[in-house]
């Protein structure tokens, strides 16, 4: 028989297999051209990206030109927006420092992890090392991990960055208006400035606004020269980029600025009419230097850069949003946000649905081939959103129980509490609403001026139910913080006012 499958010659069989393989290849190409494949990103298909996460302190929605700022000039952020994606409705997990950083690092609401909204040098707890941070997830996926800047999740073991997945740390461990804890280890060649002596540190000396600079787990400078801090963070980030050619890297750059007290280098001092604008312009310069370095090193097309802020403005502008830092009105928790990845994220794109800082961890796990720990988190993967500006948002509702609490659902923003008559959250130029709750149409009323609760009781009822469910869920599933470990015999971390009182008593 001479049927096709009855050939006995090895050469004939190999010939026919070759013909079939060729035919299959040609048909595959033709079908791909007729029916294009959806090229959704996956870490298995492409080389995993480098990650640079820039987290500004106290920068408001209206502090940047890409959101309409008219004071400071931010040309590098403008360019980043033109080359990447702007997120108009990006929320953080807390309206102040430590809670926001907890949500970012773990993808989990800070209340679920029992973290205080703000830690201080005399706090005795920090982020529990059993919680998976994005640094741990990326380190285990083969990344070099570096934290450069403000940590604020625990300033002693086991909560320092080097205990939480970062292979190196350079920065100030908390806010720059705080003070030193004498329990922290000091480098043998520590640089002491402004007349401070070793003896004073050993006795427990503290002064407000004088904070230490760390290298890994040691203090290398005290008090740090804050005028140079933005510049030095930037130089450190550039060095890590240039030294990381052999493996993917993750740089977490939580800037100290633009938190009070404001500081800028000589190059930026006096460039504008306001010190806050000078500080914003130096942060913009920093972003530009990092993007320029990535391009010069041939890494731009394989690097995802994320830019956002920890909470709303303290001294800058959150306009046109209502309120500022500390508030759950949008001015306190809705942040200026950009994502940049040339060739992957559509240039000049804008995403207008709700996304959040808790989403970054699961998103990076998807993009970078990382494995989540299996512990419950609150964030959702937004990788599809990053590559398609019209993708449906992952959050049907976003609930925060920070302060008096709030719910965002579609165009609605709901507050389960009555509008206040006084204080920084009080309405300006009008009397407060008499309604027991507040409901605003964010799409039509971005500044949250007109309370629609009376007109939409069914919406209020639905969102109140979501808020109550969220609170009950958090309270039923809290996980612990970690206790900071103080060296035996270390002086207590006295507040500066306590230290001054102690000094006065010793002089008597």
Image: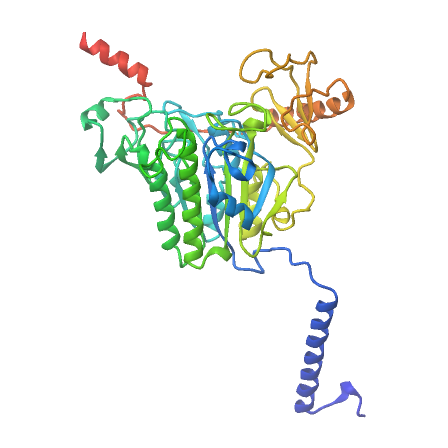
- Visual colour scheme: rainbow
Residue 438 pos. (x, y %): 68, 19
In the figure, residue 412 lies in which quadrant? top right
Q: Which quadrant would the N terminus be assigned to in this image?
A: bottom right
Residue beneath the point at 22% across and 22% down: 203
Q: Nearer the viewer, residue 182 or 33?
A: 33
Residue 413 pos. (x, y %): 67, 27
In the figure, residue 268 lies in which quadrant? top left
Query: Does residue 181 appear to the left or right of 304 in the view shown?
Result: left
Mark count: 0
Residue beneath the point at 49% across and 40% down: 133
| Extreme residue in the top direction | 508
Q: Is residue 308 above or below residue 126?
A: below
Residue 227 pos. (x, y %): 32, 34
Q: Which quadrant would the C terminus be assigned to in this image?
A: top left
- Residue 164 in view: no
Q: Is residue 164 above or below residue 486?
A: below
In the figure, residue 457 lies in which quadrant? top right
Q: Nearer the viewer, residue 389 or 368?
A: 389
Query: Does residue 77 appear to the left or right of 441 in the view shown?
Result: left
Query: Does residue 130 appear to the left or right of 458 in the view shown?
Result: left
Residue 210 pos. (x, y %): 30, 26
- Residue 162 in view: yes
Residue beneath the point at 49% across and 43% down: 77
């Amino acid at each position: 028989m001479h049927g096709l499958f009855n050939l006995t010659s090895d050469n004939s069989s190999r010939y026919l297999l070759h013909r079939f393989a060729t035919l299959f290849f040609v048909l595959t190409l033709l079908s791909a051209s007729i029916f294009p494949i959806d090229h959704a990103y996956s870490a298995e298909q492409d080389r995993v990206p480098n990650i640079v996460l820039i987290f500004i302190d106290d920068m408001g929605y209206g502090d940047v030109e890409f959101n309409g700022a008219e004071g400071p000039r931010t040309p590098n952020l403008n360019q980043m927006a033109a080359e990447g994606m702007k997120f108009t409705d990006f929320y953080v997990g807390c309206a102040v420092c430590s809670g926001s950083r907890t949500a970012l690092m773990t993808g989990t609401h800070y209340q679920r992890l029992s973290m205080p909204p703000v830690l201080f040098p005399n706090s005795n707890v920090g982020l529990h090392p059993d919680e998976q941070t994005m640094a741990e997830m990326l380190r285990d996926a083969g990344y070099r991990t570096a934290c450069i800047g403000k940590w604020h999740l625990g300033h002693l073991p086991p909560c320092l960055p080097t205990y939480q997945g970062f292979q190196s740390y350079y920065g100030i461990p908390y806010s720059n208006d705080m003070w030193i804890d004498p329990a922290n280890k000091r480098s043998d060649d520590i640089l002491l400035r402004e007349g401070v002596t070793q003896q004073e540190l050993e006795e427990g000396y503290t002064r407000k606004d004088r904070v230490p600079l760390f290298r890994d787990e040691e203090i290398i400078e005290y008090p740090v020269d804050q005028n140079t801090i933005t510049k030095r963070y930037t130089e450190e980030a550039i060095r890590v980029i240039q030294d990381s050619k052999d493996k993917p890297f993750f740089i977490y750059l939580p800037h100290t600025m633009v938190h009070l007290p404001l500081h800028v280098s000589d190059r930026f001092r006096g460039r504008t009419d306001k010190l806050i604008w000078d500080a914003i312009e130096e942060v913009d310069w920093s972003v530009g230097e990092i993007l320029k370095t990535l391009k010069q090193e041939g890494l731009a097309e394989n690097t995802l850069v994320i830019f956002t802020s920890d909470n709303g403005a303290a001294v800058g502008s959150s306009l046109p949003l209502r309120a500022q830092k500390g508030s759950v009105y949008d001015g306190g928790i809705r942040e200026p946000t950009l994502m940049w990845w040339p060739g992957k994220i559509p240039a000049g794109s804008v995403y207008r649905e709700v996304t959040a800082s808790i989403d970054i961890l699961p998103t990076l796990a998807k993009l970078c081939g990382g494995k989540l720990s299996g512990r419950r988190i609150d964030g959702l993967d937004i990788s599809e959103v990053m590559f398609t500006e019209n993708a449906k948002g992952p959050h049907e509702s976003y609930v925060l129980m920070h302060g008096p609490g709030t719910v965002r659902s579609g165009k609605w923003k709901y507050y389960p509490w009555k509008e206040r008559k006084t204080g920084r959250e009080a309405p300006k130029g009008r009397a407060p609403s008499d309604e027991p709750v507040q409901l605003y149409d964010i799409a039509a009323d971005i500044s949250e001026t007109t309370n629609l609760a009376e007109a939409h009781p069914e919406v209020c009822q639905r969102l109140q139910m979501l808020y109550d469910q969220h609170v009950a869920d958090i309270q039923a599933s809290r996980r612990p913080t970690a206790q900071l470990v103080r060296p035996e015999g270390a002086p207590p971390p006295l507040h500066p006012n306590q230290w001054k009182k102690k000094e006065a008593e010793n002089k008597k």
